[in-house]
Amino acid sequence: MSAQPATTTIELTQKEDQLKDLLLDTAKYVNNSQPSAQPVILRWAGGWVRDKLLGIESHDIDTAVNTMTGEAFALKICELCEKPEIAEKHRITSADIGSLHKIAKNPDKSKHLETTTIMLFGFDVDFVNLRKETYTEDSRNPQMEFGTAEEDALRRDATVNALFYNLNTGRVEDFTSGLKDMKAKLIKTPLEPFQTFMDDPLRVLRLIRFASRLGFTIDRAAEECMSDVKVLEALKLKISRERVGVEIEKMLKGNDPRRALQYINDLGLYHTIFTDPSKSSMPLPDLSRWHTVYECLSYLSSNEAHESISTALVQTEEASYYAWTLAALAPWELADEPKRNGKGKPPPPLITLAAREGIKAPNRLCDVVTAAHKNKADILALKTAVVQKESCINERDRFGMAIRHWDARGGYWQLQVLFSLLVEAMQRWEASSTSSKNNDNFLGEWQLFIDHLRELDVMDAPSMKKLIDGTQLAKALGVKPGKWMMGALEFCVAWQLRHPNATDPSGAVEEVNKRRNELDIPPS
């Protein structure tokens, strides 16, 4: 590590230049108000520098201040911008300066530093002081102190994230090996990796996220430490599950979620991440075939020959994230559920616990996971019926009502179908040869199923407009609304699916009337 950092330059956009000039004027304003103090030097840090060097556009800029807190400097910006001559000089409009937001540190959530954020010229600009961290064996949280730029660089998770752009000199500063590692497409820790991960085990997941997002390789020495039993135990117990979930979400929404899951698999991290850490008795799912799940999903997402499966089942960015989460959780589907004594409310399935407690998945996603688990047998049965050309496959109401049932239990019925496909892939997908005849046959069955749903015109069954509502049905039957209504209305929907061209519900009412006893409808 040399005292003089390696350097290079960055070409700024017009807006970035405008922001830089305002920040430098603020630093001058501060320096003039306290001439005897150490002058303020500003640096843009971390991800923005890395992305600029890679030609990736970024609107999030971390600004490191050497002599004062981020909040104190941000307040000086607001103070300076109130001066008319400054607003005119920097061409500042009311839309260019947003509100100041302070984000308090929260050590229990692995957030060890207070930051202050302002929206400036369209950028989310975070302000924080340069710092160094001191960890003690008996504390999970570091002691934070003002530090030098080099000390700040050394405490970061990866060398490619430890670069600074010095606003005063207009040059990049590299106090580690960040520039060299960028060229080598290598993710390394600035300091010895084992201690780096023991100080903050969340860095294990951050390195995987950066490697998968950037297409870089993780340094071999770092990989070995990421698999260390002590590091895994620290990650499981020391880091809040919310923070673990945030990193997993960013990975699965990133450029290459397949690679992220492969890293988790290869480094032996699965049982540390996708579990309920409060339940030591929770079983360990078999991972021997998990690779077939994410390789199959990756193949579906990128292969034009089977694009229709992917486009039919994954239709939005959120759905894509949910799909990769389902792929991540798929091994739990084959784990044996604990036996119940039959008393009380049944516990959530293991796969839902892994989502809810392991990565703190939001309720909506947990609902999809639970529904995918509970509806899998029904989905596979209908798929098998289509493949085997059973006599029931032309019953439009059977398929339409099934889809409505799946969707009502968790939404995203298409993703529930995808989940069944991925679980089946654990038995049938040949990962070593994605173009094999077996794989083509396997996906061909699912394509046949989806094509059949399209032919029946039931893909939009959950949003189908009903011909009759409960009030109208009760009036037509001459009875008061009651518990009978739900079943009767479901019968009307099934009738409507059998008669897709009907515009008058009288036929449905007539059928319901014939089945009054069956549907528990009271006499009129």
Image (tube, rainbow, N blue to C red):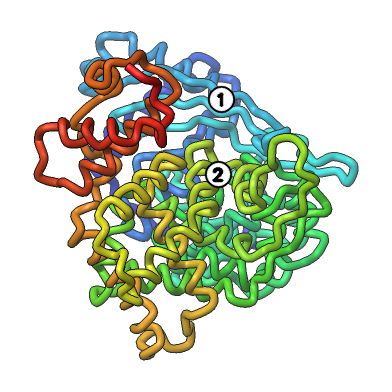
Residue at the (25%, 16%) spot, across then down: 475
Instruction: Give, as a three-letter code, the residue at label 1.
Output: Ile
Residue beneath disc 1 = 103
User: Residue 120 in the image: x percent, y percent?
Assistant: 34, 27
Q: Nearer the viewer, residue 31 or 523?
A: 523
Instruction: Give, as a three-letter code, the residue at label 2.
Output: Val
Q: Secondary structure at mark 1?
A: strand
Look at the picture and state if 372 lies above or below 168. below
- Residue 481: tell me if it is visible: yes
Name which quarter of the figure residue 111 lies in: top right
Left or right: 393, with 169 as reference point: left
- Residue 214: tell me if it is visible: no
Q: Secondary structure at mark 2?
A: helix
User: Residue 150 in the image: x percent, y percent?
Assistant: 62, 49
User: Residue 75 in the image: x percent, y percent?
Assistant: 48, 16
User: Residue 78 in the image: x percent, y percent?
Assistant: 40, 15
Q: Are marks 2 and 1 in contact (CB under 8 Å)?
A: no
Residue at the (24%, 52%) spot, across then down: 458
Residue at the (62%, 73%) spot, across then down: 266
C-alpha distance separating marks 2 and 1: 17 Å
Q: Which numbered tag is attached to residue 246? A: 2
Look at the picture and state if 446 lies above or below 274. below
Q: Nearer the viewer, residue 227 or 313?
A: 313
Q: Nearer the viewer, residue 196 or 72?
A: 196
Look at the picture and state if 288 lies above or below 61. below
Name which quarter of the figure residue 131 lies in: top right
